[in-house]
Amino acid sequence: MTHPPAYHALPLPSGVTISYTTAGSPPHPTLLLLHGFPSSSHQYRNLIPLLSPHYHILAPSLPGFGLTTTPPAYTFTFSSLTHTISEFLTTLNINSYAAYIFDYGAPILFRLALQDPSPIKAIISQSGNAYLEGLVPAFWAPMRALWASNNGAKERDDLRSNILSLATTRYQYVAGVPDADIPLIDPTTWTLDYLQNLQDKENQEIQLDLLYDYRTNVELYPKFQAYLRESQVPLLAIWGKGDPAFGVEGAKAFKRDVKSADVRFVDAGHFALETKGGQIGEAVRVWLGKVDMGGMEIGVGC
């Protein structure tokens, strides 16, 4: 029996309405997919069919992204985003899951782990960073300037012009990708990200607030690392070796804290699923199939 993707809007008690994709059979182990900047759950559209025969997939769009809506008083910080995802999981009665984390999704998952590590049975990190050495200096220089300025107006304007543009959105998709693979990336992806999440003034202010608040994630890196050391959670890091934002040293660093960490690289950039989705999907399926997910039956189809 197949369970094709279905698309939902879930009202939460806080007033947020989460847009999310679900697929697979709920009796199977849950796999939470947390997306990154500047995308939405749409970035997992090709991965979901590869894993849904074996897992119950949940892919929410974070507040400020995709079709998720927020009340007027919502504060766009990573603390708020973490609270919203926690509320989302509680509302759906999800108390045991593996997580696939990418970009912004990583600090959200690690913040959840600091609150309560017990539901998290395994982590797949695809450019989901938790180490200073993973921050590529050239890419992060404009954000560090914003942090140092205490959210200065000039620095916000610089980011608005140079980071929140269609050209830079495209760059995040194609940088580090072998020339022969660039035609595999549908231009609709970066165009949708820009039009949906970056183009208008209100969305730009949201994204600038989150870029400024990202500094609080970096401050929490030592605590994220302590969680990894103490939990020894099963972890697969599978990164694009050409990622311009989160370098390969960030992936390698996981082995310092999780002794059994499986670290792999694919010949891709930041959005590695766009060109290596089949390879990554198969690697995740095989690796996760060996993980104890609380005694639940894994990988049997539905």
Image: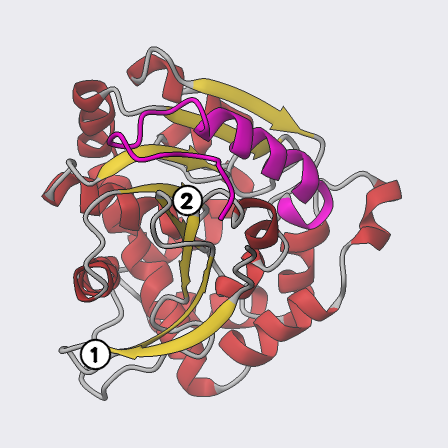
Q: Name the element at disc 1.
A: loop
Please state the horizontal and vertical placement of residue 203, each as a whole percent of the image. Answer: 43, 80
- In the rendered image, residue 285 lying in the magenta stretch gets the answer yes
Q: Is residue 51 above or below residue 65?
A: above
In the depicted view, which residue is nearer to us: 40 or 154? 40
Q: Is residue 128 left or right of residue 238?
A: left
The answer to whether residue 127 is above or below residue 148 is above
> Magenta stretch containing residue 255, yes or no?
no
Magenta span of residues: 273-302
Q: Is residue 292 left or right of residue 91?
A: right
Q: Which residue is mark 1?
A: 74
Residue type at mark 1 is Tyr
Q: Which residue is mark 2?
A: 101
Closer to the N terminus: mark 2 or mark 1? 1
Distance Cα–Cα, label 2 vs label 1? 23 Å
Q: Quadrant of residue 233?
A: top left
Seen at 56% across and 57% down, the residue is 2
Q: Position of residue 196 (x, y in %)?
A: 54, 79
Q: Quadrant of residue 118?
A: top left
The answer to whether residue 110 is visible is yes
